[in-house]
Amino acid sequence: MTIPRVELPPDVRLDTLAVREGLPRTPWGENSEALFLTSSFVHPDAATAAARFANEEEAFVYSRFGNPTVTMMERRLAAMEGTGGCIGTASGMAAILLLILGLLKSGDHVVCSRSVFGSTIKLFQDFAKFGIETSFVSQTDPPQWRAAMRPGTKLLFAESPTNPLTEVCDIAALAGIAHAGGALLAVDNCLCSPALQRPAALGADLIIHSGTKYLDGQGRVIAGAVCGPQELVASKFVPVMRSAGMSLSPFNAWVVLKGLETLSVRMQAQSERALQLAHWLEAQPSVERVYYPGLPSHPQHALAMAQQSGRGGAVVSFIVEGERAAAFAAIDATRICSITANLGDTKTTITHPASTSHGRLSEAQRQAAGITQGMIRVAVGLEDIEDIKADLGRGLAGPAIKT
């Protein structure tokens, strides 16, 4: 027995895969994918159960490491990323934890961008006590990555664009450096998603996702995934999942599965709004600098346009005059934006990275990553962009009290 696949033409495109890939319909003939809320699965006899638990026969046996709804989400995301395999996890950080546990051992070395998400930095640092050392380098300087390589380097880890500075790395260049040194390259594709960027096509070996963000798209559930070659997923990550159980719940997988159906149209619309907002912010007297890959002023603008399907994504960060007090005042003056550190929602969110998403880092680490106290991050949603401009304008025009 093998788990069947959806019969699709071999040349269907990404937007079709986003709607159709998964598992075949059940005998009931449902059009919307079924949600399988079950902890275990029944077998016809004891011998079959033994074969399935021994991985001698492909089947669903226990939802900690296999469930039809989760498999549908995994197959759909893998197809969209252009990888053979995918494994869902309980969160984006659980995906990075699975990556570390599946690939690394004591004595191994990692090279990582110093501009990645704060919790990612903290997680890699925490593994130093288990003998896994990480060197943090400039996101945008491939020679630094090359210089940091050692005989024991097993993994290069990047996030592109980064949160919140939207720094873009040259994925193909980093892949070349990794492979020349016998290492793998993992890219966190959270801010772009496969709707805008497919790192595997640029040479990345593994793609990390926080499905909590754009894959869901409406801020409903926590989810994560690791995408990569099927053999690598099966040999390195599935055994860890069977033992450690950082599993993605079927319900959360179903929500992300349905979110993938609208991912492309959402990312296009939100990217267009973000570009308008970024141009507007550049014209505001109280804004010192705007970070957005879609702007010609962005240091990696040309690279971003080449890697990200000509779009800048939906995250815009900017620095206001007056440091933390001015940033807090601008945030507090909003009436529409949601003050929350999450992103990827259809609702525009606003946050102060230095005290939220990167609050656990030291001030020296934040400064090294370029995250100042005057920085504000906006993840643009689907509201009318003129209303979002007006909302931010309340705070940028001067201190205000929220009523």
Image: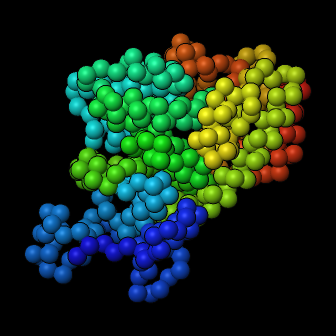
Left or right: residue 322 versus residue 366 is right
Residue 114 at least partly seen: no
Q: How is the image coloured?
A: rainbow
Q: Residue at x 45, y 18 (%)?
A: 144
In terms of image quadrants, where is residue 316? top right
Q: Residue at x 64, y 29 (%)?
A: 300
Q: Residue at x 12, y 69 (%)?
A: 50
Q: Nearer the viewer, residue 329 or 83?
A: 83
Please determine whether, in this image, residue 259 is positioned above or below residue 207: below
Q: Residue at x 42, y 75 (%)?
A: 6
Please determine whether, in this image, residue 11 is positioned above or below residue 107: below
Q: Position of residue 245 (x, y in %)?
A: 30, 51
Left or right: residue 383 versus residue 255 is right
Please determine whether, in this image, residue 332 is positioned above or below residue 369: below
Q: Position of residue 58 (x, y in %)?
A: 23, 69
Please determine whether, in this image, residue 281 is positioned above or below residue 2: above
Q: Position of residue 60 (x, y in %)?
A: 28, 69
In terms of image quadrants, where is residue 10? bottom left
Label total for image: 0
Q: Residue furthest left?
A: 47
Q: Quadrant of the N terminus?
A: bottom left
Left or right: residue 101 versus residue 76 is left
Q: Position of residue 296 (x, y in %)?
A: 74, 31
Q: Residue furthest top?
A: 364
Q: Quadrant of the C terminus?
A: top right
Residue 39 at least partly seen: yes
